[in-house]
Image: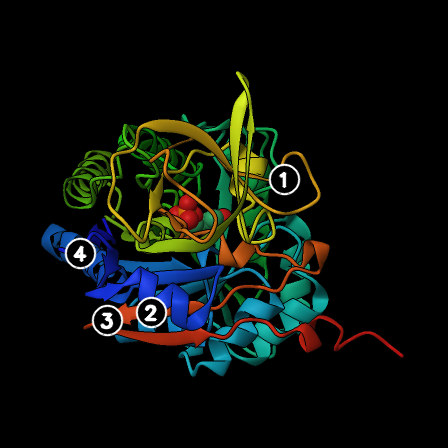
Amino acid sequence: MAVKYNEYGELTMGGTSLKTLAQSFGTPAFVYDEDEIRNQMRRYHEAFRKSGLKYNISYASKAFTCLQMVKLVDEEDLQLDVVSEGELYTALAAGFDPSRIHFHGNNKTKREIQYALENHVGYIVIDALEEIDLINKYASEPVDVVVRLNPGVEAHTHEFIQTGQEDSKFGLSIKHGLAKEAIEAINDKEKLNLKGVHFHIGSQIEGTEAMIETAKLVLQWLKDNNIEVELLNLGGGFGIKYVDGDTSFPIEEGIAEITSAIKETAESLDYPVPEIGVEPGRSIVGEAGVTLYEVGTIKEIPGVNKYVSVDGGMSDHIRTALYDADYEALLVNREEEADETVTVAGKLCESGDIIVREAKLPSSVQRGDYLAILSTGAYHYSMASNYNQMQKPPVFFMKDGKAREVIKRQSLRQLIINDTK
Ligand SMILES: *Cc1c(COP(=O)(O)O)cnc(C)c1O
């Protein structure tokens, strides 16, 4: 866990009191344990190194990106996935080596394809048949491509975030012949080089079974169709712990199981063992980050519920409203027994603006206290909006007892900067 209480009963991260941080910089704020982010990246590296297979680990920018995050990814020697002109721009602005960037997306615009080609990204992931002609048309030199397959497999996660099933906007269906058609079309294009295949079967996956079964199915399909590729990319989706009862994906054992299953399957099919790619997002930054809020209005509806409202909301925390996701809240400024179940609500104008539906907190919680919401490092800042003209919170990286501001709080002026007068 990224946070713990110190001897004075204050919640800390990386040796710093979060109460002091909240008092100095204000709330809402996102705070990350930098060592924990780095450690997650190192765990993936180490697990793959042990497998002896060729591998590449690519951080999915969409989970959380900014210049300093990209630099950290670079320092830890990961590659980078981007899905938009803006994510690519951010990566390039941070000085990330474009040959280690992969461009994804189910509807890449012409402009995005040109931008990716001009900057010589490592490879482009083909997610639709139309892209093959477009890339070939705009490419001035040979370009590596990877085909995103839709293997028709479901990972057992929340249905809103399944992406591997047949009826999906992502990937090219194996069963319906689209994947085969894509590979034939790529082979016909002189400028396109088929580097590999890719799948991404869902998010918040806890075990290895779905990934292994999908990899086996894909290897069998490659073999049956005489398609030889150097890269098999398994996508992301490695689960994290949001609340007690969740299990985070066991990186060491999980990667060991997956890589040995792939090696065995390839060998038994007499298929060259491919390089393995993974694209973790959530499992790199998710548990390393927390959100700090200040408590405001407390409303008790006798016999019904108690609402503890905080100074942010769905503008910085959308996953409860979007996915009915669960979170844990901790009182930051004193350690006390959680003897009550309350709803932590945001301050935005929607009944659905809830942060934690059933939070266990001390009944003493009052206006002016600070709360930390755990495991908000992925898909929180990156999904933040200016709904209700809320300002996006700042982001801090904590390390060795110091707070480093990596994104400043959005100013009021910035809210109207693009408005014409
Ligand atoms: C979202 C996504 C990822 C990252 O998913 P996590 O659940 O954050 O690990 C990786 N690859 C692709 C193609 C994605 O769409």
Image position, residue 334 (x, y; %): 27, 49
Q: Earlier in the sequence, mark 2 or mark 4?
A: 4
CB-based contact (under 8 Å), mark 2 and mark 3: yes
- Which residue is painted at 59% across and 63% down in the image? 84
Q: Earlier in the sequence, mark 4 or mark 1?
A: 4
Residue at the extreme top of the image, as rendered: 303
CB-based contact (under 8 Å), mark 3 and mark 1: no
Q: Which residue is mark 4?
A: 8
Cα gap from disc 3 to disc 1, whole angstroms = 40 Å
Is 363 or 241 nearer to us in this picture? Answer: 363
Q: Amino acid at mark 3?
A: Lys
Which SS class for mark 1?
loop
Which SS class for mark 2?
strand
Specify the quadrant of the image occupied by residue 15: bottom left
How many discs mark residues in the rendered view?
4
Q: Which residue is mark 1?
A: 169
Image position, residue 410 (x, y; %): 59, 71
Which SS class for mark 4?
loop
Instruction: Report crowding for label 2: few under 14, some 14 to 19, many 20 or more residues within 10 A (C-alpha).
Output: many
Q: Which residue is mark 3?
A: 399
* Residue 73 appears in the rendering: yes
Q: Amino acid at mark 2?
A: Phe
Image position, residue 367 (x, y; %): 48, 48
